Image (spheres, rainbow, N blue to C red):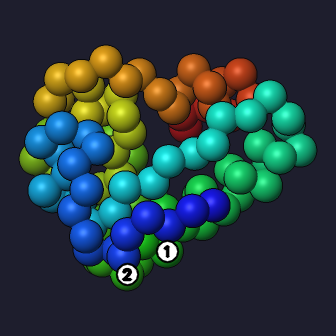
Amino acid sequence: MYQVGQPGYVSYGALNANPYAPAQIELQATPDKVLFAKNYAVYVDLIRDLCNQFGIPKTLDAVYGTNGAKSHLWVTNNFGGDHTDPYGYLASMGISKA
């Protein structure tokens, strides 16, 4: 895992959604299921920790105008762009959106 900025620093990696986001988190894609399991555990823990730190509800892809964690697919559907991850990749590793 790499940290490229301090939480609270706005990086414009998700179009106009980022001015509202104190963090941007990426999940490494790997075909290795053992490495994926380790990465995914850190990914989920980091999302939860940052939600706690910044008082963000632990909801995923809630409707526009509500706070919570948002995926690239959510950003594409609400702001534009062409990213549809992470759901296809997660599904290929046995993880559903639920």
- The reply to whether residue 41 is visible in this rendering is yes
Q: Quadrant of residue 30?
A: top right
Is the N terminus in the top left, top right, bottom left or bottom right quadrant? bottom right
**Measuring 22% from the left and 62% from the top, which residue is drawn there?**
10
Can you say whether 83 is above or below 20 in the image? above
Can you say whether 91 is above or below 3 in the image? above
Secondary structure under the numbered disc 2 in the rendered image: helix
Lateral position of residue 40 relative to residue 55, left or right: right
Residue 3: image x %, image y %?
50, 67
Residue 35: image x %, image y %?
83, 46
Q: Which mark is residue 49?
A: 1
Residue type highlighted by circle 1: Asp
Disc 2 versus disc 1: distance between alpha carbons? 6 Å
Q: Quadrant of residue 42?
A: bottom right
Residue 87: image x %, image y %?
53, 27
Lateral position of residue 66 relative to residue 91, left or right: left
**Residue matched to label 2:** 53
Q: Which mark is residue 6?
A: none
Frontmost residue, 91 versus 8: 8
Q: Are marks 2 and 1 in contact (CB under 8 Å)?
A: yes
Secondary structure under the numbered disc 1 in the rendered image: helix
Can you say whether 23 is above or below 83 in the image? below
Q: Residues within 10 Å of mark 2 (few under 14, many from 20)?
A: few
Q: Quadrant of residue 11?
A: bottom left
Lateral position of residue 46 relative to residue 65, left or right: right
Residue type highlighted by circle 2: Gln
**Measuring 25% from the left and 34% from the top, which residue is drawn there?**
75
**Measuring 31% from the left and 18% from the top, which residue is drawn there?**
82
Residue 68: image x %, image y %?
30, 56
